[in-house]
């Protein structure tokens, strides 16, 4: 019994590692929020790291972690708003629709930190961890490189991003 359990675990780990790839990504994300007459739009560079599990020939699961930092800020009624950081953990479900092209759905759990400053004073604030849901489309140029366009929403905050993914 013990030998069968060890053999089964070894075979499972070999089959999982044979059908999985590390995936790193980098991209630009526009993070926006609207509340009445106030519209905030912040830009950031977002890096991701994930592990792709091939479920079958057309479907993959990719748990990933994303980290971002601001590169463009916004002025709202005389207050400068800057993105300090963006964090998200997600699991993507990718479905191949044609040669090289795939679509995906991505439930996420994320938060962001911003700084608002005016008149020599500044205040930092961070959001609570929020559940988000999004989707996107990607195109694989090769087995190891792809581009993606995605949209996600976390409560009232929208994230539109474009990026590149690299598998190894």
Image (spheres, helix red, strand yellow):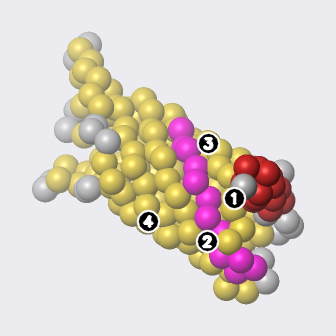
State how far apart marks 3 and 1 are (Cα). 16 Å
Q: Identify the mark nearer the N-term, 4 or 1.
A: 1
Confirm whether residue 66 shows in the render: yes
Confirm whether residue 26 shows in the render: no
Residue 145 position in % (x across, y down): 80, 60
State how far apart marks 2 and 1 are (Cα). 10 Å
Quadrant where the N terminus is found in the figure: bottom right
State how far apart marks 2 and 3 are (Cα). 19 Å
Residue 134 is marked as 4
User: According to the image, label 1 marks what residue?
Assistant: 52
Whether residue 125 sits left or right of residue 101 in the image: it is: left
Q: Residues within 10 Å of mark 2 (few under 14, many from 20)?
A: many
Instruction: Establish if 114 lies above or below 4.
Output: above
Q: Residues within 10 Å of mark 4 (few under 14, many from 20)?
A: some
Magenta span: 56-67
Whether residue 56 sits left or right of residue 119 in the image: it is: right
Q: Nearer the viewer, residue 137 or 1?
A: 1
**Which residue is rendered at x = 68% and y = 52% of the image?**
51
User: According to the image, label 2 marks what residue?
Assistant: 94
Q: Identify the mark nearer the N-term, 4 or 3.
A: 3
Q: Identify the mark nearer the N-term, 4 or 2.
A: 2
Mark 1: secondary structure:
strand
Q: Nearer the viewer, residue 20 or 4?
A: 4
User: According to the image, label 3 marks what residue?
Assistant: 47
Q: Identify the mark nearer the N-term, 2 or 1.
A: 1
The reply to whether the C-beta atoms of the residues labelled 4 and 1 are less than 8 Å apart is no
């Amino acid at each position: 019994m013990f030998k069968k359990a060890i053999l089964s675990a070894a075979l499972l780990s070999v089959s999982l590692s044979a059908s999985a790839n590390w995936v790193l990504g980098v991209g630009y994300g526009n993070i926006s929020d609207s509340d009445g007459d106030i519209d905030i739009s912040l830009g950031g560079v977002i890096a991701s790291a994930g592990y792709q599990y091939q479920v079958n020939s057309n479907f993959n699961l990719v748990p990933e972690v994303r980290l971002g930092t601001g590169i463009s800020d916004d002025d709202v009624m005389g207050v400068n708003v800057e993105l300090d950081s963006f964090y998200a953990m997600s699991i993507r479900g990718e479905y191949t629709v044609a040669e090289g092209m795939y679509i995906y759905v991505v439930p996420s759990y994320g938060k962001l930190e911003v700084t608002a400053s005016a008149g020599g004073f500044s205040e930092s604030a961070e959001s609570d961890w929020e559940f988000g849901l999004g989707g996107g489309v990607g195109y694989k140029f090769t087995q190891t490189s792809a581009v993606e366009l995605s949209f996600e929403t976390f409560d009232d905050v929208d994230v539109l991003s474009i990026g590149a993914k690299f598998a190894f």
